[in-house]
Amino acid sequence: MPSLPQPDIEARLSDLEHKLLARDKTIDALKRRLAQQDEGMRNSPFALLEQNISLANVVARKTGELEQERQALQKTLGELRQTQTQLLQSQKMESIGQLAAGIAHEINTPTQYVADNMSFIDMATTSLLALADRSVAVIAALRAGQPDPALLADFDAALRRTKLDYLRRQIPDALAQSKEGLAHIARIVSAMKAFSHPSGVNKVAVDIREVIATTVTVARSEWKYVAEIDTQVDDDLPDLPCRRDLIGQALLNLVVNAAHAIADTLSEGVREKGLIRITATRFGDRHIDLSVADDGPGIPPDIRERIFEPFFTTKPVGKGTGQGLAMVYTTAVDQHGGEILCESDVGRGTRFTMRLPLCIDNDETSPCR
């Protein structure tokens, strides 16, 4: 099946689900009518018998036809859901592709200084082992009671070349720096693995702190040169029932948009960096507010009504596709039954909030019920 745009898929899914519900209602109505006719037949003349038999045949035939149509609709619905999953995964991989250069730089930098440190430690090890060999030779001569002035002179020369005091200071620093670099690489790889992994079609309870940390790591190359990141999460925040990959993708889109908005203000030379604040708080007993705020230029009032429209963008050709905020809207509203809120003050910044319900469909113990 050819890929469809996300809004078209959502519309097709909704239309098919309504058709299935309509077919079920039709079958139930025909069955009720037949039952009513059967009830009346016990108190009616035999003249109604032929009509009831005819109606029963119609109901049986229609039931068969409707069941076949229902099965066909279910098959189409399954295919559309599979296409939707593939499209969402494609959008995630596209985002990773757009960030690839920055992520490669994030990995390359610590890799380079780890390699440099390993070269230094290799050289230091060679010098120390040579010094150790001369030390063994001098000690052996002393034990034999035959101190050799030439051996001592050679040892003294090697000790001066080795610069032992310098190595004592530098080797621990090189090892610590290398361990830090390797840990940074491991965090990036772990974040990429978590971000790109599809989470399935069912909602599961997710620690929103982990989603925020992963997203900040993946998007680091976009924000680190233009903004500082501040994250604030309520201590008693419960796990969020959601599709993790969709929430992560939506949060990534908001963070990247915030970084781009701030970057536009830095070109004026007024300041060196802006601020992106990510918060996760309870909203009443039934929702979590996941917000991304920036101190960028804000959104002009005349375009605020259109920011969630697919393909709408104010960025130059080649820089924006207009899909980011549309995908955020679809994730928060259509996929999770929540809301997307936008507060913006021109010249002071913008705050986007995904208000997400703390419930899973058909969960009788959920706080949403």
Image: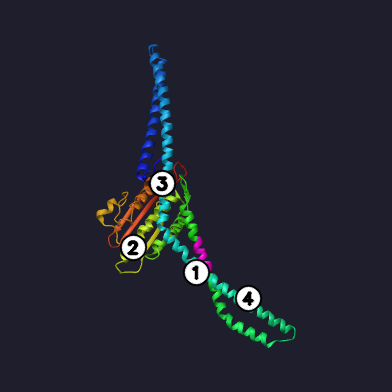
Q: Nearer the viewer, mark 3 or mark 2?
A: 3
Q: Earlier in the sequence, mark 1 or mark 4?
A: 1
* Residue 100 screen position, x and y as percent: 43, 58
For label 2, the crowd category at 10 Å Cα-Cα, with few meaning under 14, some 14 to 19 and many 20 or more, is: many
User: For the magenta stretch, what is the residue range?
Assistant: 177-186
Left/right placement of residue 104 relative to residue 149 reads: left
Residue type at tag 3: Leu
Left/right placement of residue 321 relative to residue 154 reads: left
Q: Earlier in the sequence, mark 2 or mark 1?
A: 1
Q: CA distance from mark 2 to mark 1?
A: 30 Å
Residue type at tag 2: Ile
- Depth check, front residue: 240 or 181: 181
The residue that mark 1 highlights is: 113
The relative height of residue 62 versus residue 12 in the rendered view (above or below) is above
Q: How is the image coloured?
A: rainbow
- Assess whether mark 4 and mark 1 are in contact (beta carbons under 8 angstroms): no
Q: Secondary structure at mark 3?
A: helix
For label 3, the crowd category at 10 Å Cα-Cα, with few meaning under 14, some 14 to 19 and many 20 or more, is: some
Q: Secondary structure at mark 4?
A: helix
- Report if residue 119 lies within the magenta region: no
